[in-house]
Amino acid sequence: MPGTDSEATAAREASLPTRAKLAVTAGRVAAALSQKAGRGSGSVIGGKVALKLDPDLLATLAEHLDVVLVSATNGKTTTTRLIAEALRAAGPVVSNALGANMPAGITAALAGGSDAKFGVIEVDEKYLAGVARDTRPKAIALLNLSRDQLDRAAETRMMAEKWREGLKDTDAVIIANADDPLVTWAASSCRKVVWVAAGQAWKEDAWSCPSCGGVMQRPGDDWFCQDCGFRRPQPHWALQGTHVIDPQRGAWPIQLQLPGRANLANATSSAAVAAVFGVAPQVALQRMQSVTAVAGRYDVVSYQGRDVRLLLAKNPAGWLETFSLIDGPPAPVILSVNAMDADGTDTSWLWDVDYERLSGHPIFVMGQRKLDLAVRLEVAGLQFQVVDSLDQAVQMAPPGRIEAIANYTAFQQLRKAVAN
Amino acid sequence: MSYPSGHPQQYNPQQPAPQQYNPQQAAPQQYNPQQAAPQQYNPQPAPQQYSQQQPAPQQYEPQQPAPQQQHGRSSRMSDSNLRLVWVYPDLLSTYGDRGNALVVERRARQRGLGVQRIDVRSDQAVPTSGDIYLIGGGEDRPQRLAAERLRNDSGLVRAAENGAIIFAVCAGYQILGREFINDLGEREAGLGLLDVWTTRGEGARCVGDVLAEVDPRLGLPQLTGFENHQGVTHLGQGVSPFANVQVGRGNGTGDGTEGAWRDTVFGTYLHGPVMARNPAVADMLIKLALDVNALPPADTTWYDALRAERIAATRQPA
């Protein structure tokens, strides 16, 4: 387990029950061994060992923290970073900043030790209810839900139902995206909800009312079900252009180093979360400015003398948001798609993405499933080149900053390629 | 800026007390029946978002669109446009099966055909005058809602009686049958357009790449696709298996059958989408609509490359 050896950590660990102490130590040993064996940071294996020895460890570690949980289909890693930065205004923060978002990874992050006041935790959608039970959070941010890796994940509406069931008795303040009917459905059984009009470009998973199954009416930004009356709640916070509107109607400019509408939305939700902990929006937003690349996402790297911006898009909703932030034509675009277990092994979702939007860009396709992409682009009536490597794509690309968009493992491979 | 710029600690977020959502309270006065009226089905304009897919100059498409007089128009086709109906994308478009509509449209246009794409939402009437109807896969509850609405609407059944071509995938395939098990665990009536019925599989969900040989009477090459279903579909006397699997589970009955068909109605479990992996299936539907035996050639370079890769990968999983 990564950690500092500060006195505060030692003091904190000394105060843990014996079983938890043993578990933390064993986890650290396992992590160190794993790290030595060259298998990454070892934080997940360390967390697994520790949780095995003390199943209550996550609850024990969270006891002294003001915990915020962040979950969503898209944007949870970035939003976790933004909230962590914002809350540092009010005290030290511990966070699973690198995206290890299942119970083992979360346990490892919290056991990493610090004298933290706040725990800002990204949680995989499937584990949210359990982690919420264990960590007794003060706040939970729910950003969006959409189709993602359907060959191995639960159905999208079932996920909303799971959240709704799992969170209905929570004491946490729920910060929920009022523009996402599925998130609204999940949150609307909770006692305390702060609604945020954070927007949602992707609408294809919520044409059917999550409550009664009626056909959803979606005029403009509004949405409602004609059959049962389930409808968009009145938001307390809103994203308006590039400003956060707070509950007192104060408008605060968002100045992020991160691109795109989706990150403006993430910042808006983060400001609403920060407010729950007494951090004012102007303070929160100012601190968010310091966040640049998050786990390599949005990073502009220099590769073979060219500027390449690395963009992660894992599912149709993510691709849609990504298309809206890239440089316009004739900026060259590289697309890379894999279908490993972590990506989902079914590539059918490519056909839910409007690649037609790339019209006018020189396009280069690569990755394990470049031929699926080639057929998709051919049917979209686009011109493109199929290449074998990033090297080749960059050499063939006409001048200009290159936008490289990739799904999960393809993105990791791009990062590796540019690092060499 | 009206916001107090004081110390962060003084900021009190609780001022507008977080409210529980309450549909009764939730501003019914904003409800506007004019806006809310379900849109009438309008056969004239094709959905706007697809108009940009008109064939642009193609780097990879050497063929020119064939002159239209090369093939006769059948009486089946209502006018000079191929009317391609996509049934209930709001409920049944979860697994990328939208691609089937895109591929049929593309391959028809490459043959110089006009295509009128009609997307029918589940609060709209299903037109009876379409040439080709496509139905996709969906999740369990939307599947039940789709079956209810299609039974009530009856447009698709009447179209089938008129000899329309219907091609359905996964949940849509089950709906075409006599019955299936719905999300509530109950038997749900289908449309009875195919003599099949679907039960819930007791074993593991069927997930993975599929390779199958199509019924030789259809004259199609090897079928490749991806299946993801719990249902097990049993075939009655009135249908033939669409294909027989070499790899994968297909109908899940253990006898190797995949999908079902009779006349111009087809059902399959294959996603991928199936037309992207098997453009010959799209061509078959177009030929049936035109009532011709052959179409002018259209480039299949990238489809062929993808097929070769997927067939090899499915034969020898990593």
Image (spheres, helix red, strand yellow):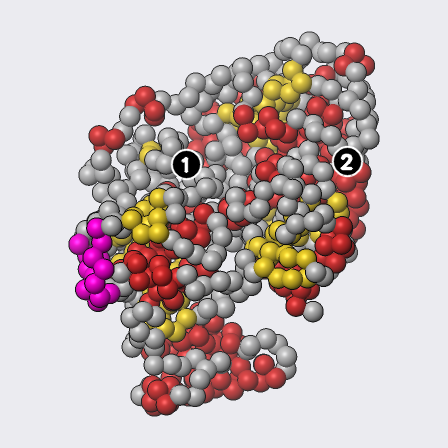
> Mark 1 = which residue?
A208
Q: Is residue B98 left or right of residue A48?
A: right
Residue B11 in view here: yes
Please, what is the dominant secondary structure of the magenta stretch?
A: loop
* Amino acid carrying mark 2 in the image: Gln
- Residue drawn where x is 40% and y is 50% of the image: A265
Q: Residue B309: x and y, percent?
A: 77, 49
Mark 1 belongs to which subunit?
A
Disc 2: CA contacts within 10 A as few (<14), some (14-19) or many (>=20): few
Give left or right: position of B44 versus A241.
Answer: right
Q: Chain of mark 2?
A: B
The spot of residue A354 in percent (x, y) is 58, 38
Looking at the rendering, in which quadrant would you find the C terminus of chain B? Answer: bottom right
The answer to which quarter of the image holds residue B237 is top right
Residue at image position (66%, 68%) is A419
Q: Residue at x 67, y 64 (%)?
A: A418
| Residue B220: percent from left, percent from top | 78, 32
Q: Which residues are magenta?
A: B2-15
Which residue bears the numbered disc 2?
B59
Q: Is residue A182 left or right of residue B89?
A: left
